[in-house]
Structures are given as structure tokens and as C-alpha cells.
Amino acid sequence: MRFKLYFKGETCDYTDEIRRKFISFIKKVFKNHSEEVYHLIFSSKKVRPYVYSPFFGKDFEEKKIGPEISFIFSSGDYQITSSFWNGLLTLKEKKAHYLKINEKKFILNNIQLLPKINIKSFKVIFKTVGVAVLTDPSASSRDFKNWYLIPEKENIEKFNEVLKERVKQKYKIIKAIDIEPNLKFTLLEDYPLKETIIPLFNGFIRGFRGYFLLEGEKEILKFLYDYGFGVRTGQGFGLLTIVKQL
């Protein structure tokens, strides 16, 4: 299930702390509905059972945010989406339904329930909404070049190995089921991916954006659609949209 949240406020300067603001807002939503669900999600540094992606406004290229911003929130867990929805309603009742960025308030003025998508094919062309990030657990996190993997022709076999490993880990954490995902990531020649470096929490991370083909079991493809691709999905990376089911 997916929601799109629309906020309106005053245009302000971009800040590297902006993702913290979205994370804080999401935490506030859950905490205002259920302490139990809040602690279930945030009591440890485990994988979050959701993914979201922010849109900072039409002037973001000029390092400006707003005046209208939005984000999409997605999860395949009904308890999570139900708690999120009810938390939003509680915030509205308390007049606390806003994001605060650089001392500017962005008020939540619309919540849209997005259409449910069923995956009926073993081959799907996806597009990233924002940036996707994949890290190699066999590399050192201090090794910026090798820790972050960008899919290219030269490393596509390695990329697929790491992708399957990360999906297996995430599926185990969220679903409590061990799987050996049969999954294949393929580059699209006519749509080259774009490498992107993003400031995050006083540092930088490396990811990519664009179109790609994924082949695998429908359940696994739906899992990636619902919960996000790669790592750091709880920090606003890895949301996918479906371009075409082949």
C-alpha cells in the first residue's frame, strides 16, 4: 500500500539535514498512533519495514526547497500502513501535521491513497523514484568506491550476487522467512543509469537512478516494490515505480 503526502509552505534553502526532517516526521506519525508499533520499528537499527521517497519542490535544482513538497510512503505490511494512516489522522487532530525545515513550517494539506499494483509477470521494467543504493557487505564501509555498488556491464555479475544477498537478508528480517531469491538485474541499453552522490548525515553516499529490468519470482518483485530496492530504504532511498510488466 502506498500513500502520497503533499505539504505546502514557504520556499527555503536546502539543508543537508533535510532527510532527518522526513525521518523525524515519520517517527512522529507512528508514535502518535501506537507506542507498540513505534518501538517495533525503531527500537533497534534493523531494516525498516517500509520505504519512502521525498520530492523537494520544483526549484530543488537551485538548492531551494518548496513551496510545495511531497513524499511517497510504501509498505507491504498492513499493520504498518494502518498505523501510519491513523497516525496521520491523529496529527491532524492535534494540529501537528507539519514538517519543519530551516524554521519554516510545511503543512500537510493532502493525503492520497495510490492505486494498488499487482505484479503478474516474472519480468518487470522498474524506474527508481529518486535514488537507489546498494552496498557490498564484503567491502569496507570506509572504502567509498567499493562499498557502494553502481551497476555497470563490467560488474553486473557481482552486482547481482550482492543484490540477492541483500534481498535475502531483508526478507528474513521483515518476513522472518529464509529464501534463496532467484533474481536477475539487467541494464537497459537505451536507458543508461545515472550515478548520483548525495550528502547524508555529515557525509556522502553513492547511488544510482534510472530504468532497469528485474527478473524473478513475482513475490520477490512485489517485495522490492513494496519495501524498496537496496539499502537505506528507511532514509528515503530505493523506492521503485513500475514502468512495464513484460
Image (cartoon, rainbow, N blue to C red):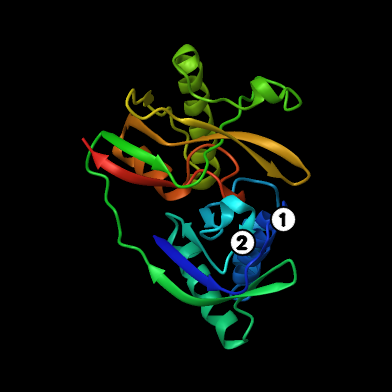
Q: Earlier in the sequence, mark 1 or mark 2?
A: 1
Q: Is residue 2 left or right of residue 70?
A: left
Q: Position of residue 209 (x, y in %)?
A: 48, 37
Q: Farthest residue to the right: give it.
A: 202
Q: Residue at x 60, y 43 (%)?
A: 232
Q: Give the Cα separation between the discs numbered 1 and 2.
A: 9 Å
Q: Amino acid at mark 1?
A: Thr
**62, above or below 216, in the image:** below
Note whether residue 5 is visible: yes
**190, above or below 109, in the image:** above
Q: For mark 1, give the secondary structure.
A: loop
Which numbered dot is residue 65?
Answer: 2
> Crowdedness of circle 2 by 10 Å Cα count: few (<14), some, many (20+)?
many
Q: Is residue 88 left or right of residue 191?
A: right
Q: Is residue 151 left or right of residue 183?
A: right
In this rendered view, identify the residue nearer to me: 215 or 172.
Answer: 215
Q: Residue at x 49, y 20 (%)?
A: 161
Question: Which residue has dot 1 on it?
Answer: 15
Q: Amino acid at mark 2?
A: Ile
Q: Residue at x 68, y 63 (%)?
A: 24
Q: Position of residue 142 (x, y in %)?
A: 76, 26
- Quadrant the N terminus occupies: bottom left
**70, above or below 17, in the image:** below
Q: Position of residue 39 (x, y in %)?
A: 67, 62
In this rendered view, identify the residue nearer to me: 60 or 16.
Answer: 60
Check contact, mark 1 vs mark 2: CB within 8 A. yes
Q: Residue at x 61, y 53 (%)?
A: 62
Q: Classify residue 91 by image quadrant.
A: bottom right
Q: For mark 2, give the secondary structure.
A: strand
> Crowdedness of circle 1 by 10 Å Cα count: few (<14), some, many (20+)?
few
**142, above or below 231, in the image:** above
- Quadrant the C terminus occupies: top left
